[in-house]
Amino acid sequence: MQLDMKRNQVQSSLKKIGHIEGIPIHPTIGMEDPWRYRNKVQIPVGEKNGELITGFYRKQTHEIIDDMERCIITDEVNDRMVDAVREIANRLGIQAYDEEHHRGTLRHIMVRSGQVTKQTMIVLITRTEKVPPQLETLISELTETYPHIKSVVQNINTDRTNVILGKKTKVLWGEEYIYDEIGDVKFAISAKSFYQVNPTQTKKLYDKALEYADLSGNETVIDAYCGIGTISLFLAQKAKKVYGVEIVPEAISDAKENAKLNHIDNVEFYVGQAEKVMPWWQAQGLKPDVIVVDPPRKGCDEVLLHAMLEMKPKRIVYVSCNPSTLARDLRVLEDGGYHTKEVQPVDMFPQTTHVECVALIDRV
Ligand SMILES: C[S@@+](CC[C@H](N)C(=O)[O-])C[C@H]1O[C@@H](n2cnc3c(N)ncnc32)[C@H](O)[C@@H]1O
């Protein structure tokens, strides 16, 4: 039922927002075991009766649900690691961040684990750069007890804000990265980089994107909003040259590292706003055969959509995590002489209302 609902959601957004009808919207690609799939959790830390508590916020509040024992869409190891950090930190007297008075230390615990490699990164998000001396004991207890932890990172968020991660990140123990694999491509992932949360479904999504890109080996391809280069590296195996652009500098350094790790040398990665870099590429005379875009939920910037139209690629492959902005952007592309050929929804986020899609758009 969820799969049908998600397909209907895509269909209705395309119709109502994009005025796009009568094209194939395929049945949503589901997951065999749609539980415990998330490779990352970010859990707020608070205090109750002098004890540290962790749990999601109750809806529309910042009240922590402190009897949350498990999150059943999260990899079990991540649940266990949040418990372990909280228990040790509590015993050592490390203070939770007090949002009201902007005091205390530990704001959030973030845990990311590689589905294939089983490596874990723990990110401790703190209010100040200076940390209490007990943190060293916390790290040694954690890493001695759980050998799958390969990296412990501190992220400093000094602001009064709802945004979880701050600007500065410091490796406290172990590696700067953990590694994971999707298909036969390996990825180094650092604390602040975007990495798809459901690797099983990501493989299905990327295979579809690659199929839609229909590469023969002679094409120049642009991957806009490329993150740590995941789609770029998949495409590079079948293209002549791939150009990736992404706004987060750490993600681009991961992307470069990932290209080296996989011995892929026909990709170039650039840090910048896609909507600024694309018009610049166009002015430089870059003529892509295929453009892939995978923007955040707010969709593509209009400047970028127009730059794509000017570049006149044969095909555009649009990967989207928000059917509403997908529909809005497809309308701009349709009005600019392109045609949406088909859309494939993929259930990247089972048990939630979110749906991911990949759309194939051809030049008319
Ligand atoms: C949905 S993620 C896709 C990442 C990658 N394609 C993947 O599958 O892992 C969107 C990415 O766009 C980046 N981003 C957001 N705004 C951007 C902008 N204006 N220009 C370039 N990249 C941007 C984010 O940092 C994030 O890495």
Image: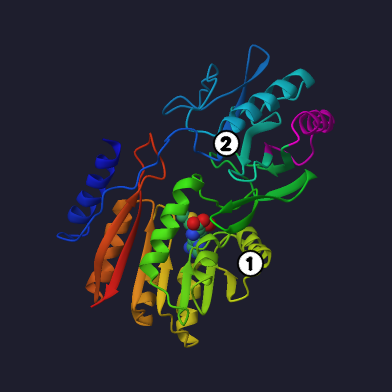
The quarter in which the C terminus is drawn is bottom left
Q: Which residue is mark 1?
A: 259
Is 104 on the left-hand or right-hand side of 350? right
Q: Is residue 101 visible?
A: no
* Ligand 1 under 8 Å from disc 2 Cβ: no
Residue at position x 51%, y 49% from top?
196
Viewer-nearest residue: 115 or 319: 115
Badge 2 or badge 1: first in the primary sequence = 2
Which residue is the extreme one toward the left?
22
x and y percent of residue 160 in the render? Answer: 59, 38
The quarter holding residue 146 reads top right
Looking at the rendered structure, the secondary structure element under dot 2 is strand
Question: Would you say 181 lies left or right of 145 here?
Answer: left
Q: Quadrant of the N terminus?
A: top left
Residue 251 sits in which quadrant? bottom right
Residues drawn in magenta: 123-147
Image position of 99 with respect to 169: above or below: above
